[in-house]
Every structure is written in structure tokens, then in C-alpha cells.
Amino acid sequence: MNSASRRGVDEGMSLTTAHRRRSAVPLAFLLLLAAAWAAPAARAADLDQAEQRIVEQTNRLRRAQGLPGTVQNRQLDAAARGFAQFMARTGQYSHQADGRQPVQRTRAAGYDECLVAENIAFQHSSAGFGTQELAEGFFDGWRNSPGHRRNMLDGDATETAVAIARSDRGRYYAVQLFGRPASQSIRFEIGNRGPQAVRYELDGKPFELPPRSTRTHTQCGVPDLRLQLPGHAAPELARPAAGDRLRVDSVNGRWRLVRP
């Protein structure tokens, strides 16, 4: 399952595997072996190492797509770990299993967000898992699911956390969080010095800027700005950075965008 919130989207996914032991022992040997045979102990993965491998694999995936990696965050880790342990303890499985949305859990852990996205999944095997096998099962499942992959490749995410918890019945629950703190929001100005209103779109949302006025925007990620200047057939494109002060004006009847 995946969920995303920008100051939250839900699909569904679970990963379940079952291993069955096959026996080709001839009947004549059964009585001789019955007393000596014992089922092998289930393998136990190192959860700390499995979590770290998922973080590293996800960052390699991001970099292969031309995106920066994410850094681990303690508040996100606390939220992810608490929720993974809750699902392992109760057997309840959904983004709202504890009665809260992902962003409510991260805020309770002290994370001041402008973006939070969450992937969850579970795996089970009667034979247990090796560390690499467990990590790759979660990573591959998320990577190959469009909604989860979208969270993994969110270019606005800068921080992450992964937590895995094992239930008493041997089911492994994983939570992967992505975030961008409010402190990394992008705040910029756009001013209209011309004699008539200017229309523009910011991340697809339409705006109109009256003459001789200024508007301030605060965006979670890098903004996609499209200005329709009077007399121009094609829109003027810009991707403002934090602190930018963009201006549009008219000189001798010709409109232009003035970048910093």
C-alpha cells in the first residue's frame, strides 16, 4: 500500500509468500527417520541490516533516474518504527490501521512536514527469511508497483526512514516513509508592474495577478510556473528557487519576465 500527503492517495499491496517442504523419502525409511528427523529452524533476518539495504537500494534507484538520494531522519524513523510494531503486534494492516493517517503519525513524532509519503507491505514464509531476501522482497514489491514506485521516485522528497517489525506468528511488516520538512519549502514572489492583469499557472493551478501587485507563494517542491504574457503566443516558463523575486513588466507595449 502507498499513501502520500502534501500538508495525502491510497492503493493496495501486500507481499505474501508460502514455502512448502517436499519429501521424497521412501516409505521403508520413514520409521527409521521419524525419531531423528526434526524440522529445520526458521531463518531469522537481521532487521537493522534489512532496513539499511532498502534505504540504499531505494537511493540507487533514485540516482539511476537522475534524482538525488534521501537522508535518514530520526522523526520519520520513530513514526515508521512505531507503526510497523503496531501492525506486527495487532495484525491490523492498512495506512489507517491505528486510526491515524500517515501525516498524523509523523507529526506526533515531531516531524514538521510539507510532504509525507508512505509505503507499507508485509511478507510471510514458514521457512523465514535471510536478511538480503527479506530486504529485496520489500524493495522489489514496491519498485514494481506503480503507486509505490511513484513515492520512491518523488523528486521533492529529501528525507526517508524504513522500519521492519516481526510478529509472533512470523509475519514481517515494513513501513517506508519519505518526507520533505517545512523548513525546505520554496517561498518566492511574483510581481506585476504592467498596466493589466497577467494570468499564470503554478503546478497546474490557475492564478491571475492584478496590475501593479505582488503575490507570494510557498511550495513544497520545485514549482512549475507558466506565465501567459499579453501579446505572447507561447507561455513563459520558469522554475523559481527559494527567495526568488520574479517580475513581469511592459516596456513600450512589450511584456517580459524579469528573472533574478
Image (cartoon, rainbow, N blue to C red):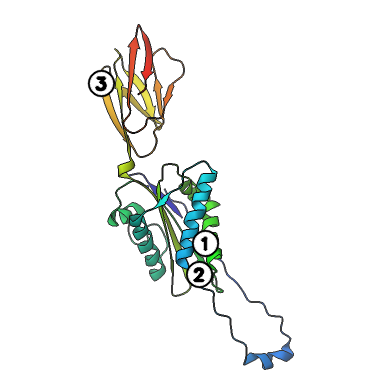
Q: Secondary structure at mark 1?
A: helix
**Image quadrant of residue 235?**
top left
Disc 1 packing (10 Å; few <14; some 14–19; many ≥20): many
Amino acid type of the residue tagged 1 in the rendering: Ala
Q: CA distance from mark 1 to mark 2?
A: 9 Å
Q: Which mark is residue 135?
A: 1
Judge whether 42 appears above or below 243 on screen.
below
Q: Are marks 1 and 2 in contact (CB under 8 Å)?
A: yes
Give the residue pinned by disc 2: 45
User: Residue 8, relative to residue 74: is it above or below?
Assistant: above
Of the numbered discs 3 and 1, the one sitting upstream in the chain is 1
| Residue placed most toward the observer, 214 or 5 | 214
Instruction: Give the distance between the C-alpha atoms of the residues marked 3 and 1, in whole angstroms.
Output: 53 Å
Quadrant location of the C terminus? top left
Residue count near mark 2 (Cα–Cα under 10 Å), binned few <14, some 14–19, many ≥20: some
Number of callouts: 3
Q: Which callout, 1 or 2, points at the residue further toward the start of the chain?
A: 2
Residue to which mark 3 is pinned = 213
Secondary structure at badge 2 equals loop
The residue carrying pointer 3 sits among few (fewer than 14), some (14 to 19) or many (20 or more) residues within 10 Å by Cα, namely few
Closer to the eye: label 2 or 3: 2
